[in-house]
Amino acid sequence: MVALRVSLLPCALYSMRMPFTFQSALTYPLPPPSTIKGMFANALFLAERGSPLDHLDCIEQALVFASAFASAPIAVKSHIVRLVRLDKKGQTDALPREFAQTPQPITAVAATEDRDLAQRLVNALRRAPISLGDSESLCSVVHAELCDVQDVTEAAPVDVAGYFPEDAAAKQLSQGTLYWVHEVCHKASELVPYVFPLLQQKQVLQPTAVRVVPASGVRVLRIAQECFLVAEGSEHG
């Protein structure tokens, strides 16, 4: 198995709308698994052409998991993104939308048994234009590399760097923030609760590691000194 580790620096504000917040347009602070997979597929399409849906199918079948974490605080705030007068009474279609901003790169991590695909993704991400969520949320790929993957076998509690499915932890010994996410984006899927390694302080989310006791059957993978939880035999990640 090989891991793909990508440092993503947002160029300005970014917004990855939660699918159930149509009127308030709340944003995820970190790219959920479906966004990471869609971003990878788009990069392959821009670099190699072909069918973007075929690239997405390949990625969703090949990735063992996908996760992300922040290296600096993330500020989140709601803005009015448009204001159009609809009639003489002054009615408008003003809609709020939440945006996030962070001064340091966000790290996305994924693992696969397909080393050739991982290398193609590294090559594509180094030259393709990338966005977080919508096309206006541009970001720069600061670094993309392949890393070795090590199974952690000791039974002690683990400090987990990236977000993980809530049911992957038998016991959570420190806090994170719960978000409901899609794990895949090419087919209909239910929203799954994930614990993000972030602690909210007013409108700022502070990065943290979440200490957990992994659930039975959950693998702990160490990638570049950070640990991640992977649920075996499921679509998690």
Image (tube, rainbow, N blue to C red):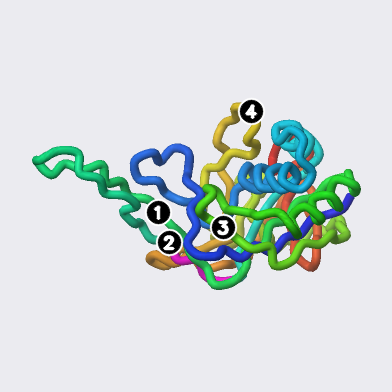
Taking the spot 72% from the left edge, 60% from the top edge, the residue there is 6
Q: Quadrant of residue 226?
A: bottom right
Q: CA distance from mark 4 to mark 2?
A: 29 Å
Circle number at residue 98:
1
Query: What amino acid is found at the position of numbered circle 3 in the picture?
Result: Leu
Estimate how packed mark 4 is, as few (under 14), some (14 to 19) or many (20 or more) residues with alpha carbons within 10 Å. few
In the image, 202 versus 214, the foreground residue is 202
Mark with earlier residue (3, 4): 3
Q: Residue 136 in the image: x percent, y percent?
A: 50, 53
Estimate how packed mark 3 is, as few (under 14), some (14 to 19) or many (20 or more) residues with alpha carbons within 10 Å. some
Query: What amino acid is found at the position of numbered circle 1 in the picture?
Result: Glu
Estimate how packed mark 1 is, as few (under 14), some (14 to 19) or many (20 or more) residues with alpha carbons within 10 Å. many
Mark 4 — residue? 187
Mark 3 — residue? 138
Taking the spot 10% from the left edge, 40% from the top edge, the residue there is 88
Taking the spot 37% from the left edge, 50% from the top edge, the residue there is 97
Query: What amino acid is found at the position of numbered circle 2 in the picture?
Result: Val
Q: Which secondary structure, mark 2?
A: strand
Estimate how packed mark 2 is, as few (under 14), some (14 to 19) or many (20 or more) residues with alpha carbons within 10 Å. many
Q: CA distance from mark 3 to mark 2?
A: 17 Å
Is there a contact, CB below 8 Å, between mark 1 and mark 3? no
